[in-house]
């Protein structure tokens, strides 16, 4: 009977100790905001067989990074299609026309990440990919972007206040119904995004 009571007291003491001990909470996902002056969204297309470049400004961005589990990171980006520009005035007008982006009806382009695949080294660089959904002209299709995330040069390994982000990929404009001027403009459009983000708050 005495041994039974001692065993019971020991179990209660262990339980109390475990309840009173500091609990290890999951690391928070850190919110980031874009630094507009250090952000550049470019696209490349072929006009009469020759490569041409354009830019689209970012209207809004919601970026969240989990330093302890990068695969949980998230991104929601909204581009201002109505302010898209190319190096040629007539090409810019054609870009915004009903047959291509139709910006009068669809002034925004949105990308929402749905998964993050880390590179072979377990980081958001060297082969990392961000899969998500791109909404263009009201049509939503899957899009995978090659991704790289870097600390600012000269900063400590633990300093995640500012990060540089590089994204790249390509898409078929016809898949989104942007089929205008097929005799002049190629179907494939490549994307190259360079952004700098800073911890919010």
Image (cartoon, grey):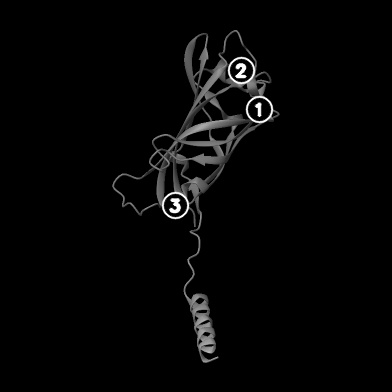
Q: Are marks 2 and 3 in contact (CB under 8 Å)?
A: no
For mark 3, does the 10 Å Cα neighbourhood hold few (<14), some (14 to 19), or many (20 or more) residues?
Answer: some
Q: Which residue matches tag 1?
A: 103
Q: Which residue matches tag 3?
A: 67
Mark in front: 1 vs 3: 3
Secondary structure at numbered mark 1: loop
Camera-side residue: 50 or 146? Answer: 146
The part of the image, by quadrant, that contains residue 194 is top left
Camera-side residue: 8 or 28? Answer: 8
Residue 31: x and y in percent read: 51, 52
Secondary structure at numbered mark 2: helix
Tell me the distance, in whole angstroms, between the alpha carbons under discs 1 and 2: 11 Å
Q: Which residue matches tag 2?
A: 94
Tell me the distance, in whole angstroms, between the alpha carbons under discs 2 and 3: 43 Å
User: Residue at point 52% right, 76% down?
Assistant: 19
Secondary structure at numbered mark 3: loop
Residue 81: x and y in percent read: 60, 30
User: Disc 2 or 3, which lies upstream in sequence?
Assistant: 3
Residue 79: x and y in percent read: 57, 35
């Amino acid at each position: 009977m005495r041994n039974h009571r001692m065993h019971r007291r020991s179990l209660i003491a262990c339980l109390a100790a475990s309840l009173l001990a500091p609990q290890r909470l999951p690391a928070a996902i850190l919110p980031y905001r874009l630094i507009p002056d250090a952000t550049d969204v470019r696209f490349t297309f072929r006009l009469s067989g020759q490569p041409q470049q354009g830019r689209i400004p970012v209207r809004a961005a919601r970026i969240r990074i989990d330093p302890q589990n990068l695969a949980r990171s998230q991104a929601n980006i909204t581009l201002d299609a109505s302010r898209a520009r190319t190096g040629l005035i007539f090409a810019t007008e054609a870009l915004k026309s009903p047959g291509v982006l139709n910006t009068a009806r669809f002034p925004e382009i949105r990308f929402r990440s749905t998964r993050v695949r880390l590179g072979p080294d377990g980081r958001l660089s060297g082969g990392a990919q961000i899969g998500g959904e791109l909404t263009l002209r009201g049509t939503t299709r899957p899009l995978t972007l090659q991704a790289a995330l870097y600390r600012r040069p000269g900063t400590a390994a633990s300093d995640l206040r500012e990060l540089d982000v590089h994204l790249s990929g390509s898409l078929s404009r016809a898949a989104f119904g942007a089929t205008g001027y097929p005799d002049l403009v190629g179907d494939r459009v490549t994307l190259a995004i360079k952004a700098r983000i800073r911890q919010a708050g």
